[in-house]
Every structure is written in structure tokens, then in C-alpha cells.
């Protein structure tokens, strides 16, 4: 029996829960995943914390002098909540029965859909997606975020920010911070980027607010976004 192709998705919490949970996005996303599972694909979807993480980190910091480790754990727990929302949305399908946290556990799961979340302090769920890809021998990751491209600076504050359609890991890492900070808005976190470069993993970075991008990429068609490799 031929092994199913496994597609790794790092799903940004900012599109799952922009401020409140986004059922419209989740429904459309779920339908796309179902369609590709019927076509013989397998998915591991690692869900981020997004604004849920930032709201809780801000609240904690207003109560105590929170350390980075405190904030990381708060963020990790927020990814667990977001990931359970996504997992339960796939109810009555071939979805694994729980959210995975340790990336190494993905290797032994045969279900067509696996939902994961944050694991350990010191990085974001982007790193967990890279670790899952390494475990499963996958060389490509889809990163669904709330912006269209990777830029050399924040386009929300710099109207002259330069977008990239194709960029090397070396170039990308030169325009982001080399240090991980809890709750940071870096398109793909620095720890994940270093590991992806070491493992020669390609990341397709695109907006999940227009899921036609995801369909186009899965169909090997042009899409709006950035390839980092």
C-alpha cells in the first residue's frame, strides 16, 4: 500500500481567532482539507496562539512580573485551546482523537488529519511544524498567516516595506530578529527558520484570509505569497 503524501501546515492563530473565534474561516478551511483527504493526502496541522496568546500574555504581565518562560507557557496553553477548536471542528472524520504537543508522536499516527499545538518554551508553533516535518521526512511546510507576503519590515507600520516572492533562508534570517521573544509577530520564528534551513525545508508563506491561495498551492498553481528556501 502506497504511503499517503503528508502535508504540514503551520496555521496561524491570528486567522483562527482574530479577536473572537472565526467559524467562517474554520468551515472553509475544513472543507478544503476534507477534499484533499478524499484525494489521498494526509495533513498535520499545527495551530498557533495568535491574539489569544497575546491577550493572555498581556493579562499575566499586568498581574505579575512575568518571565519569558511564564509567557511562553501561557502562549503554549493558548495554542492548546485554539487547536482543540480546530480538532473538534473535524469531528466525525478521520482526525486523530487528541491534539498532539510532542512533534515526535506524529510519526506513529495513521489518521489522515492530525492537529497539533505548542510544545515547549523558547519558540513558536512554527518550530513545532518544522520538527514534525523532520520527524516525517517532509520537505515542505505551508504557513497560513494573516498577511500576504514576507516583507523586509512590518507593512502595517512601514508603507515602503519591500515584499518578497522568493527569498533564501539566509536572506530571510537577515531581516528578522535572531532572538525569540514570546508573542512576537515574526512571520516565521527565528528558531524555526534556523532549523528549516538546516533541514533544507521549504516554506510557502501565504495569507489564510483568502483560501484560494491554499487551493492554488495544493494544485501546483501560482499563488499570492512567498517561498522561503
Image (cartoon, rainbow, N blue to C red):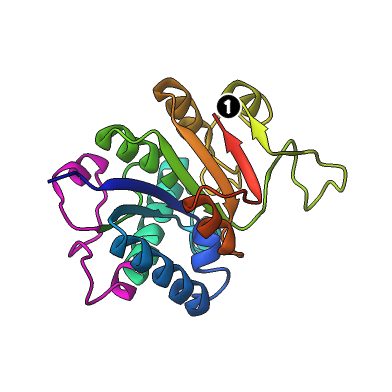
Residue at image point 36% right, 42% down: 128
Q: Give 215 or 59, whichever is nearer the viewer.
A: 215
Query: Residue 23 magenta-drawn?
Result: no
Whether 8 is drawn above or below 33: the answer is: above
Q: Look at mark 1 in the image and give the residue it sits on.
A: 178
> Residue 116, image x and y in percent?
31, 54
Left or right: where does residue 174 sit relative to residue 182? Answer: right
Q: Main secondary structure of the magenta part?
A: loop
Q: Position of residue 13 (x, y in %)?
A: 49, 60
Q: Secondary structure at mark 1?
A: loop
Query: Which quadrant does the C terminus fall into?
Result: top right
Within 10 Å of the Cα at label 1, are there few (<14), some (14-19), or many (20+) other Cα atoms? Answer: few
Magenta residue span: 87-112
Q: Nearer the viewer, residue 75 or 204?
A: 204
User: Could you tell me residue 91's position as x and y percent?
Assistant: 25, 75
In the depicted view, which residue is nearer to us: 181 or 169? 169
Q: Is residue 32 toward the left or the right of residue 117 in the image? A: right
Res. 84 image quadrant: bottom left
Question: Image height check: is 34 above or below 223?
Answer: below
Magenta span contains residue 90? yes
Task: Give percent across and percent down for residue 161.
Answer: 81, 41
- Considering only vertical position in the picture, is 110 above or below 27? above
Which residue is depicted at the point 39% across and 24% down?
199
For the question of whether residue 215 can be seen, the reply is yes
Q: Nearer the viewer, residue 82 or 33?
A: 33
Note whether residue 65 is visible: no
Q: Residue furthest right?
A: 160
Q: Count up the numbered dots.
A: 1
Amino acid at each position: 500500500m502506497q504511503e499517503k503524501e503528508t502535508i504540514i501546515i503551520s496555521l496561524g492563530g491570528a486567522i483562527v481567532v482574530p479577536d473572537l473565534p472565526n467559524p467562517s474561516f474554520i468551515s472553509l478551511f475544513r472543507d478544503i482539507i476534507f477534499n484533499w483527504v478524499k484525494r489521498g493526502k494526509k495533513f498535520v496541522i499545527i495551530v498557533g496562539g495568535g491574539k489569544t496568546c497575546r491577550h493572555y500574555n498581556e493579562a499575566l504581565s499586568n498581574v505579575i512580573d512575568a518571565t519569558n518562560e511564564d509567557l511562553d507557557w501561557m502562549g503554549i496553553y493558548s495554542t492548546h485551546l485554539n487547536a482543540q477548536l480546530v480538532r473538534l471542528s473535524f469531528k466525525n472524520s478521520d482526525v486523530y482523537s487528541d491534539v498532539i504537543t510532542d512533534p515526535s508522536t506524529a510519526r506513529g499516527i495513521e489518521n489522515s488529519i492530525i492537529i497539533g499545538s505548542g510544545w515547549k518554551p523558547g519558540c513558536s508553533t512554527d518550530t513545532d511544524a518544522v520538527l514534525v516535518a523532520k520527524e516525517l521526512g517532509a520537505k515542505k511546510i505551508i504557513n497560513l498567516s494573516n498577511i500576504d507576503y514576507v516583507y523586509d519590515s512590518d507593512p502595517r507600520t512601514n508603507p515602503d516595506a519591500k515584499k518578497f516572492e522568493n527569498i533564501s533562508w539566509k536572506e530571510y534570517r537577515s531581516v528578522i530578529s535572531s532572538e525569540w521573544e514570546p508573542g512576537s509577530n515574526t512571520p516565521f520564528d527565528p528558531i524555526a527558520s534556523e532549523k528549516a534551513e538546516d533541514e533544507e525545508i521549504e516554506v510557502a508563506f501565504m495569507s489564510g484570509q483568502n483560501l484560494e491561495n491554499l487551493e492554488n498551492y495544493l494544485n501546483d498553481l501560482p499563488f499570492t505569497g512567498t517561498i522561503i528556501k
